[in-house]
Image: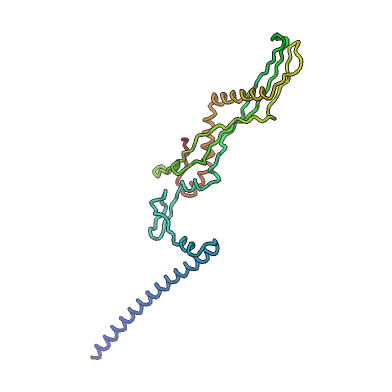
């Protein structure tokens, strides 16, 4: 009888111990979640105060979840309910508004020489005079990135390449500063005298023809291809660091539309 009482007591003590442990765990869990909720409330109040938001807006922002991992370009780490780490290449590139503008990617000096001839009396050569005018301009090629969209940026996970399709370089209107126009000495035949004078309209016409010849020279020398090579290099230097910051395994490739 006494043995049974002793066994009953031991059983009751074990049962009480288990019950106490369960209560202890529940108490710890309850305290943990109460602490989390209290911390979130404090964080919400602090966020609202720092950013001048209404408490409900700060609370809403605190509990707004990210989109599914499948909706991102590249998954780096996926801990499922405990979060994830992803990389969005298009988002990083398009988010840099400072760089999404018209870029000057290549420039080249352009020169043309015009010979002015003014024939004299009865077009007799002895009354003619001549003058050389040298036009020194600058040909500038630009790439406009302001219209770039997410469709222009593609990811190839097999080759670890991010391809950016951009507009081909465009030649801006050639600028010939007035101070860069050089007028040569007037050469006169035996019976010629005075200088060659042009009206503003005639000067503009000569300059327009000089620009046209500069364009022809640029096309003949295939300068547009040099501009493409320079544009590719310039764009790569700007955006490759962004790609590397997201994932060092990926490299940028620039293509022209």
Between 15 and 256, which is closer to the camera in this rendering?
A: 256
Residue at image position (47%, 49%) is 246
Residue that appears at 76% across and 17% down? 194
Q: Quadrant of residue 68?
A: bottom left
| Residue 128 locus on image (x, y percent) | 71, 12
The one of 83 and 21 positioned closer to us in this rendering? 83
Q: Position of residue 34 (x, y in %)?
A: 43, 72
Q: Please tell me whether residue 53 is drawn above or below residue 187 in the rendered image.
A: below
Residue 151 appears left or right of 125 = left
What x and y, as percent, mark residue 111?
63, 26
Q: Is residue 84 above or below residue 201?
A: below
Residue at 69% in and 22% down = 199
Vertical side of 91 occupied by 83: above or below = below
Q: Is residue 61 shown above or below 249?
A: below
**Image side of residue 209 versus residue 82, left or right:** right
Q: Quadrant of residue 78?
A: bottom left
Q: List x then y, in percent, for residue 201.
A: 66, 24
Here the colouring is rainbow
Residue 107 relative to residue 189: left or right: left
Q: Quadrant of the N terminus?
A: bottom left
Toward the bottom, the furthest residue is 2
Number of labelled discs? Answer: 0
């Amino acid at each position: 009888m006494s043995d049974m009482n002793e066994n009953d007591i031991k059983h009751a003590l074990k049962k009480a111990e288990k019950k106490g442990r369960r209560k202890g765990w529940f108490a710890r869990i309850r305290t943990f979640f109460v602490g989390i909720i209290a911390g979130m409330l404090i964080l919400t109040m602090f966020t609202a105060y720092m950013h001048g938001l209404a408490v409900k807006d700060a609370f809403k922002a605190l509990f707004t979840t990210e989109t599914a991992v499948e909706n991102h370009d590249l998954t780096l780490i996926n801990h499922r309910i405990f979060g994830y780490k992803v990389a969005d290449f298009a988002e990083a590139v398009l988010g840099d508004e400072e760089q999404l503008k018209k870029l000057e990617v290549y420039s080249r000096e352009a020169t043309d020489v015009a010979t002015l001839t003014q024939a004299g009396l009865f077009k007799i050569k002895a009354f003619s005079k001549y003058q050389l005018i040298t036009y020194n301009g600058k040909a500038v090629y630009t790439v406009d990135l302001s219209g770039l969209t997410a469709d222009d940026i593609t990811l190839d996970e097999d080759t670890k390449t991010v391809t950016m399709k951009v507009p081909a370089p465009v030649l801006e209107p050639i600028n010939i500063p007035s101070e860069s126009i050089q007028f040569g000495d007037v050469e006169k035949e035996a019976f010629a005298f005075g200088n060659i004078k042009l009206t503003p309209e005639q000067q503009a016409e000569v300059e327009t023809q000089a620009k046209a010849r500069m364009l022809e020279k640029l096309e003949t020398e295939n300068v547009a291809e040099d501009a493409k090579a320079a544009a590719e290099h310039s764009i790569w230097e700007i955006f490759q660091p962004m790609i590397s910051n997201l994932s060092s395994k990926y490299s940028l490739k620039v293509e022209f539309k």
